[in-house]
Image: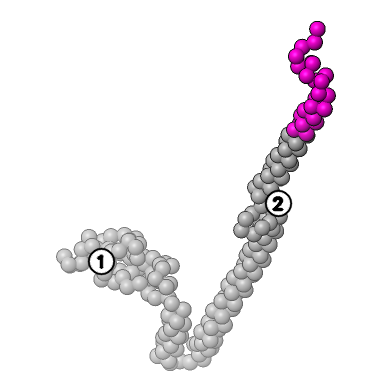
Amino acid sequence: MKTQDENLNAENPTMNVTENELISDNMAEETKDIETNENATDNQQATTEKTENTDEATGKTWEEKHIELNDRYLRLVAEYDNYRRRTLKERMELIKTAGDDILKSILPVLDNFERALKSVETTQDITAVKDGIVLIYNNFKDFVSQRGVKEIEAMGKDLDTDLHEAITTIPSPTPDMKGKIIDVIEKGYILHEKVIRFSKVVVGQ
């Protein structure tokens, strides 16, 4: 015995076909929508990956940026190494030139010493020999002064351990000389505000 729906379908076969077509069309549209959504998702993911791997400021990928920065770093290291070598070479040449300049300037003093030695062998005038030695001394003193060398004042001064080195102490000849420098055994010198040799002194006590 057929149901009422079966009877209706049997009576109206056209209606049954139409419903089946509608169902098929709906399923096709749903499948198409799903495929469209999947494609859109894939495109979005690709765009996101490209955006994540791209520097927005330069428009370059991070790999290209890495290669560029690495190349720049290698160039910088090479330039610094060249600069260091050039500076070292210039410094060595400067030191060598400075030494040549000092030796060249001291040659006239050496010439005066040779003249004084010849005079000592032939002259009988002690005063002339003495004057010659004083002249050479003053000449050499001017030479070192022009190079920034200054003598440290010590005689009669208070002992200053930054400038003086006390060799020994002796009873002071007067009460006001206690703690002061009575004698200088060896003069001290300063080169451009730096002590290059301390004064060796005797201090009163």
Considering depth in this image, is 137 or 119 the residue closer to the camera? Answer: 137
Secondary structure state at the residue bearing disc 1 = loop
Q: Position of residue 46 (x, y in %)?
A: 71, 45
Q: Tell me where residue 144 appears, x and y as whole percent.
A: 45, 79
Q: Is residue 78 magenta?
A: no
Query: For residue 10: magenta?
Result: yes
Q: Nearer the viewer, mark 2 or mark 1?
A: 2
Specify the segment rendered in magenta: 1-27
What residue is pinned by disc 1? 158
Point out residue 164 in the picture as x, y percentages from the top left corner.
34, 64
Q: Is residue 92 visible?
A: no
- Determine the image quadrant of residue 13: top right
Which residue is at 28% across, 60% downward? Answer: 169
Front residue (pair 19, 4): 4
Furthest-left residue in view?
A: 175
* CA gap, disc 2 and disc 1: 73 Å
Amino acid bearing label 1: Asp
Residue 23, horizontal then vertical, whole percent: 76, 29
Q: Mark 2 touching mark 1, by CB under 8 A?
A: no
Residue drawn at point x = 54 percent, y = 79 percent? 102
Please tell me which residue is depicted at 45% across the width and 82% down the height of the picture: 146
How busy is the neighbourhood of tag 1: few (under 14 within 10 Å), some, or many (20 plus)?
Answer: some
| Residue marked by disc 2 | 63
The correct choice, above or below, for 73 with respect to 39 in the image is below
